[in-house]
Amino acid sequence: MTTQPMDQTTQQQRGNFIAGLNRSKPLGSKRPDFSGRLSAPGAGEQHAFALWANKDKNGNTYFSGRIDRMPITDDVNAQIEALTKPVVDYDPTDLMQGSANLTLKPYEVVLFKNGFKDTENPMRPDYWGRVNMGNNTPPIAISVWLRQDRYKNPLLTGATTFPQPGKDIATEAGMAETGSEIPFDLPEGQETTRRKSSRSGR
């Protein structure tokens, strides 16, 4: 399937991205280090996701994980409908986003340390990445800033955007982002979810 180029209005849309530390994770456990939710740019539905922290060959921290196929919603029919949709991997033959060196499986998400952030550009994202929504669209770009939640734990918060045609992932990572509209704390709804998970031992 060929994906049509996105117009300028579509490119400027944003989605949300927020992930909190799983404080109840036992030492040595294989449980995710972070859990949160994200939405595609301009989309109303959100998806839960889990992230694990890792080290690359240069000693830099990166995150990898998966998003939930079902959206977060009270509409059971919408959740069932999501399960019946075919999982379609993105066709790289139509890759116009300059991400040929980054291959993601459907519903996979990755975040890398932004090497373009320095003392001269302190407002740029701390991490950049991609998420494959599993619907044959180009992987969506993610910009993430490292903050602290109300309990002084690490908090990953940022936005999703459509990759800009003609710009590769390295160029996007070096773009000056202010982060001025990025929330600094977990919404109350996610705090509630984390408490429930802690009590259940999951």
Image: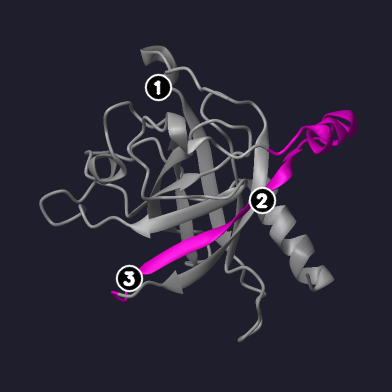
Lower position in the chain sequence, tag 1 or tag 3: 1
Give the number of the mark in front: 1 or 2.
1
Q: Amino acid at mark 3?
A: Asn
Where is residue 187 drawn, in percent x and y?
A: 60, 46
What is the magenta range? 58-87
x then y, percent, for residue 200: 83, 69
* Vertical side of 32 occupied by 74: above or below: above
**Amino acid type assigned to the residue bearing label 1 in the image:** Gln
Amino acid type at image mark 2: Gln
User: Residue drawn 33% across and 40% down?
Assistant: 179
Q: Residue 61 colored magenta?
A: yes
Queried whether the magenta region covers residue 128, the answer comes back as: no
- Mark pair 1, 2: CA separation: 28 Å
- What secondary structure is marked by label 2? helix
Q: Secondary structure at mark 1?
A: helix
Q: Which residue is mark 2?
A: 190
| Mark with earlier residue (1, 2) | 1
Instruction: Tell me what residue is drawn at x 61 percent, y 72 percent.
Output: 23
Q: 85 and 37: which one is in front?
A: 85
Q: Mark 1 sits on what residue?
A: 11
Please give the name of the residue rendered at 33% of the width and 28% of the height, measured from the top-left corner: 164
Q: Residue at x 82, y 38 (%)?
A: 83
Quadrant assignment, res 176: top left
Local crowd size for mark 1, using a 10 Å CA cut-off: few (<14), some (14–19), many (≥20): some
Q: Nearer the viewer, residue 200 or 13?
A: 13
Q: Quadrant of the C terminus?
A: bottom right
Name above or below for residue 55 compared with residue 66: below
Q: To which residue does mark 3 refer?
A: 60
The answer to whether 167 appears left or right of 21 in the picture is left
